Amino acid sequence: MAGTTESEQPLEADVWSDDDVDSGIASLASSSDSITSSILRSREENGRTYHAFKDGRYVLPNDESENERLDLQHTLCLLTFDGRLFTCPAGRDQPIRRVLDAGTGTGIWAMDFADEYPNAQVIGVDLSAIQPPFVPPNISFYVDDLEDPWTFSTKFDFIYGRMLIGSLRDWPLFIKQSYDNLNSGGWLELADVLLELQSDDNSVPADSPARKWGDLMLQAADKFGAPLDSCKKYKQQLADAGFVDIVETIYKWPTSGWPKDKKYKEMGLWTYEDLGQGASGLSLRLFTRALGWTKEEVEVFLVDPKKSGKPSLANLNHDIILLVIDHVHDTYPESLNKLTLVCSDLYFTARHVQYRRIQINMVRYKEADRLGPIVRNGLAPAIRSSHVKARVDHNDSTRFIYSGKRDGQELGLANWEQLENALPAMTGLRDLHLGPHYHFSSCA
């Protein structure tokens, strides 16, 4: 499992005042399509509308104000990731045919992806039907609960989840279902915000209105059953599910335009509007249901963070945690150039030079449960051929049955040494080592 990368050093503050916000945003904002006013399957609560399907599962509203905030947040994410819709190498070595946008929201990411990849089938799933009616022809939206059993008929090459905090209670279940519904060599990318407001230079006291609001949000979300700091556990949960080569990168989101750096100043302006526009929607359901506050108490409390709290956002930031996860080892040769599998004292490693020339299916291992999903998936499930197959003997985890054809000729390999000699010519694999030698039998 790869390490965690802090994308930037502590940010340096610029001379900053809140008077700069409106003019800054005005110069940075671009026009966006209006969100449909027809909100399907919704219910009203405290003057806001929420999804009716699986009522109460999600903490945020689904009305027009919230949808506009989500689209604003999409712009902020694009700025964070330098204009990229995703950061993993999905599509680099094999085409992206099916994509799942988990928790699609307004569908803005899914629609951008569908436009950029017109040959991919894109599916967006959300609890609310708030997506526009006119979308690219290669996209479909469904109202569903991602914590229910997934019933997709075909697996995905890429699953994307962004800003899912507060929407899921059972993250290990979501991660497991993502793993089970990815094709071999597929990718999962998660990007979530850690709602713990921080000050790089300790210039904002812990009892400031903005930081107090952040602490109450975390407390309320825990009681609600949908923690807002769940992304701190993603990395280990992904490893536990069998994902490999997990890359975690932490980006800073300044909460106003205080950084000197031009890019981070721009990000801060967008974050400022994101939090300012979303504070009521973020707080109402959590504070009323989990903390027992009234709507009026929430509104009075938010006056302080909105008024005196806006200046206190200077020199504050919070992290956005991005995890890029490979489903198997053999899809990214630039960095994942070795495939390693250990089963008892069986060892196999090969450097990939060519792809999709051989498939070795491991049907059953004595130690499969202990060794986990990587073993059960086989040695090289993304290197496919209908002509070359191998399987493990059901009674002996060290005995393989191998058969295949090369140029129309039957292959009968009696031992590991013969297989070691034959595989490079058949597959293009180099630096190949198999050992120790175990008995092979032909099953042509």
Image: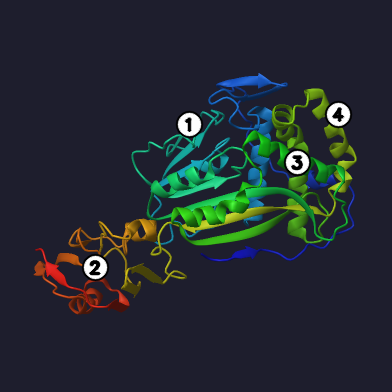
Of the numbered discs 1 and 2, the one sitting upstream in the chain is: 1
Q: Amino acid at mark 1?
A: Asp
Task: Give the spatial CA distance, label 2 vs label 4.
Answer: 69 Å
User: Which of pointers 1 and 3 indicates the residue nearer the eye?
Assistant: 1
For label 2, the SS is loop
- Closer to the observer: label 3 or label 2? 2
Residue under label 1: 144
Q: Nearer the viewer, residue 76 or 44?
A: 44
For residue 315, what is the image quadrant? Answer: bottom right
Residue located at (88% from left, 51% from top): 205
320 to the left or right of 151: right
> Residue 300 has which mark?
4
**Marks 2,4: beta carbons within 8 A:** no
Amino acid found under the numbered disc labelled 3: Leu
Q: Is residue 443 above or below residue 213?
A: below
Which residue type does callout 4 highlight?
Val
Instruction: Rate crowding at label 4 as few (under 14), some (14 to 19) or many (20 or more) other CA atoms within 10 Å.
Output: few
Mark 4 residue element: helix
Q: Nearer the viewer, mark 1 or mark 2?
A: 2
**Label 2 or label 4, whichever comes before in sequence order:** 4
